[in-house]
Amino acid sequence: MSATPDFAATLLPADEITAAVDGFLAASPATRSWDVETGVDWDDADAGLLTEGQRSAVQFVTLIEDHLPGYFDVYHRWFPVDDSVDLPVFEHNRELYHFTVRWAVEEDTHARALARYQLASGMAERSALRTELAIEGRKPFDLPYAHPVQFFAYALVQEKATQMYYQQLREVVGDPALAGLLTRLSRDEARHFSFMAEVVTRYLRVHGDAVVDPIRDVVAGFRMPLSDTLRGYWRWALKIADVADYDHTAAYEHLIKVIDRAVDARSDRVGELVDFVGQCRALR
Ligand SMILES: [Fe+2]
Ligand SMILES: [Fe+2]
């Protein structure tokens, strides 16, 4: 699926997305970035210090992060930077692209770092891991949305849920090298969440009640990435939730905070949305 004319008509104004992207890049200077080669002392990595469940959690999140080409492609299809869109839409999409490429570099670093951990710690052998990742990596990925705010609301929940999972996993893992890596990952996810929160905030301020139903639909139909395609996803997700809490609905509280901060006074529609999101959290 890809963008329609209706979709283009509901985008944020270019100035609004530009301000959000500038804020993200200002919070992500090169001096604070890290790389796989020097960011972790790989000689110390030792999977023998992990429980079987913790190793399983590392395998799971490696697969999720490694699907980056599929996630990145969603942005290209829905926010194209070519002559398939008219000039004002291109201006918006070109500004967003400054975020998307930086975000993609960071997520690709996560995928590579987790794979490197598996190799360095003795969990996996290189060619077997490459094949294992390829089997899942080539499967398609899309999001069932029709309004632009939905892509950002989805990513808001997903980035926050991932950040929380990495933080919780870090608290229990027995290998300090892995704990150090998880600290780096969770800090990046926190910045990604902040960008998504900023964009959703701007949608609420610019479009008000018109984005309430689209956001509601995201929460109503929320599934973590790859839950439809990854072999054994649900059994695996339950198992790793035992290792460290992987309840994505915990992130809904952060969505509620974003909504509350975005609006000066809740309209009836926004109030209903907040109640609905809160119920989804309670129903876990
Ligand atoms: Fe990531
Ligand atoms: Fe992220």
Image: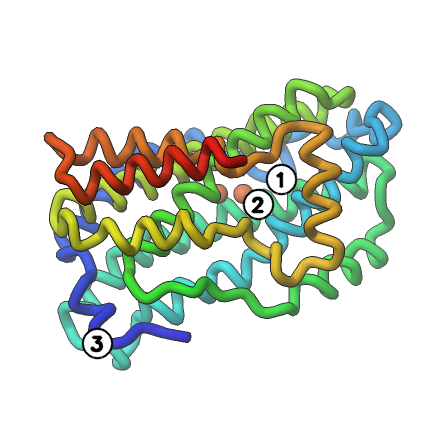
Query: How far apart are labels 1 and 2 at the CA level?
Result: 7 Å
Residue at 78% across / 29% down in the picture?
45
> x and y percent of residue 2 in the render?
37, 74
Return the disc, 3 or 2, that comes first in the chain's sequence: 3
Residue at 39% across / 30% down in the picture?
253
Residue at 78% across / 41% down in the picture?
118
Could you tell me if the residues under marks 1 and 3 are in contact, i.e. CB atoms within 8 Å?
A: no
65 vs 165: above or below: below
- In depth, the one of 219 and 184 nearer the eye is 219
Could you tell me if the residues under marks 3 and 2 are in contact, i.e. CB atoms within 8 Å?
A: no
Q: Secondary structure at mark 1?
A: helix
Q: Secondary structure at mark 3?
A: helix
10 vs 40: above or below: below
Among the 4 quarters of the image, the one containing residue 11: bottom left
Question: In which quadrant is the N terminus drawn?
Answer: bottom left
- In depth, the one of 127 and 163 nearer the eye is 163
Could you tell me if the residues under marks 1 and 2 are in contact, i.e. CB atoms within 8 Å?
A: yes
Disc 1 marks which amino acid?
Answer: Val
Mark 1 or 3: in front is 3
Which of the colour schemes (rainbow, by chain, secondary structure, one colour) is used? rainbow
> x and y percent of residue 24 in the render?
31, 39
| Residue on which the image places disc 1 | 36
Q: Which mark is residue 109?
A: 2
| Residue on which the image places disc 3 | 5
